Image (spheres, rainbow, N blue to C red):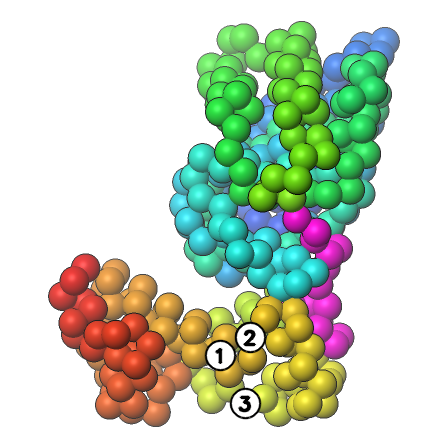
Amino acid sequence: MGNVYGLQSAAAFSEAFRVPPEMAEESIVGGDGEPSRAAGLGIYRWKTPSMESFQLPETDELIVALHLGGSRRVRAITERGLSRSCSAPGLLTVLPPNRSAAFRTDGSISLVSLHISRATVDTLRSESLRRLADSSVPRFAFRDPFVSAALESLLRAARSRQHLHAEYLGAMTHALLSHLAQWHLGSPADGALSMSPIVKLGRSSVGDLLTHIDRTLSSRLTLDDLARRVGLSRSNFTREFRAALGISPHQYIESRRIETAKRMLGDTDLDLSFIAQETGYSSQSHFSANFRRQVGVTPTGFRAQR
């Protein structure tokens, strides 16, 4: 075993996060013991840069991830738009094989992820585990103390480099998957999501468009410009945007401007005129009036509460 970094889904995570894992341990489990990247397990520790969203392509590997720290506003981008539930530190997400997924993060996150190849699941010779791997429904932002403890134990062992060998990793993974299959397979719990492979909006993805909006909040964002960006007419763009996210483009842009302003007011000492400019308002008075209407207090009052 070693830092082989050979599992396809681990490479997909690294590309999506734009950083390599802080820690990576991979192992071959089962079979004849010959090295094979098709029959492996991997445990990884990640810390992402600050980002608005990321997308994961489909692979043939099962992934169990534990949110360790960072943003508390991570949401899945589903067929109906952004999920109502948010992932926060301590919550789990399970991504089945052959499903892509997209997430909005609104900041940096840290996580530990366990990646299991389909061949490894097959070597465990358990029908319930095969059904878990065959499940087409991701599970997002749910709590399970046993699975969280198992992942944290694997992470500690990998860091110590003393006890994490193929037999230990395989046994812990088997126990973790057996628990998931027993308590979560087919359960209609709140964590079950219907994620689209990559939610599209015209010729762009929803994630790409939301990232563009956040990067250009200080500019004058018009419906015509956004519609042209995704190759739709203004009316079609408005209709498809509302269908994807549940609100109009104007409502979304206003909410992002207010959330960005709240973050700047709480985390910096920048003056109000600069914050107004950076969030796309034509004047400080316009910013202050809109902020009070949306939040219930003036920007100065909000800053005093922090």
The structure residue drawn at horizontal position 47% and vertical position 89%, both measured from the top left corner, is 220
Residue on which disc 2 sits: 247
Q: Position of residue 227 (x, y in %)?
A: 66, 85
Cα distance in 3D space between marks 2 and 3: 16 Å
Vertical side of 178 occupied by 63: above or below: below
Q: Position of residue 284 (x, y in %)?
A: 25, 87
Kindly report which numbered mark, 2 or 3, lies closer to the viewer in this rendering: 2
Give residue 222's mark. 3
Give residue 284's mark. none
Where's the C terminus, which quadrant? Answer: bottom left
Q: Position of residue 61 (x, y in %)?
A: 76, 34
Residue type at numbered disc 2: Ile
The structure residue drawn at horizontal position 61% and vertical position 39%, both measured from the top left corner, is 189
Cα distance in 3D space between marks 2 and 1: 6 Å
The crowd level at tag 1 (other Cα within 10 Å; few <14, some 14-19, many 20+) is few
Residue type at numbered disc 3: Thr
Label 2 or label 3, whichever comes before in sequence order: 3
Q: Nearer the viewer, residue 23 or 73?
A: 73
> Quick check: can you spot residue 59?
no
The crowd level at tag 3 (other Cα within 10 Å; few <14, some 14-19, many 20+) is few
Label 1 or label 3, whichever comes before in sequence order: 3
Relative horizontal placement of residue 217, taking residue 226 as reference (left or right): left
> Quick check: can you spot residue 264?
yes
Where's the N terminus, which quadrant? Answer: top right
Magenta range is: 193-206
Asked if residue 196 lies in the magenta stretch, the reply is yes
The crowd level at tag 2 (other Cα within 10 Å; few <14, some 14-19, many 20+) is some
User: Cβ–Cβ below 8 Å for labels 2 and 3?
Assistant: no
Asked if residue 66 lies in the magenta stretch, the reply is no
Q: Position of residue 16 (x, y in %)?
A: 62, 51
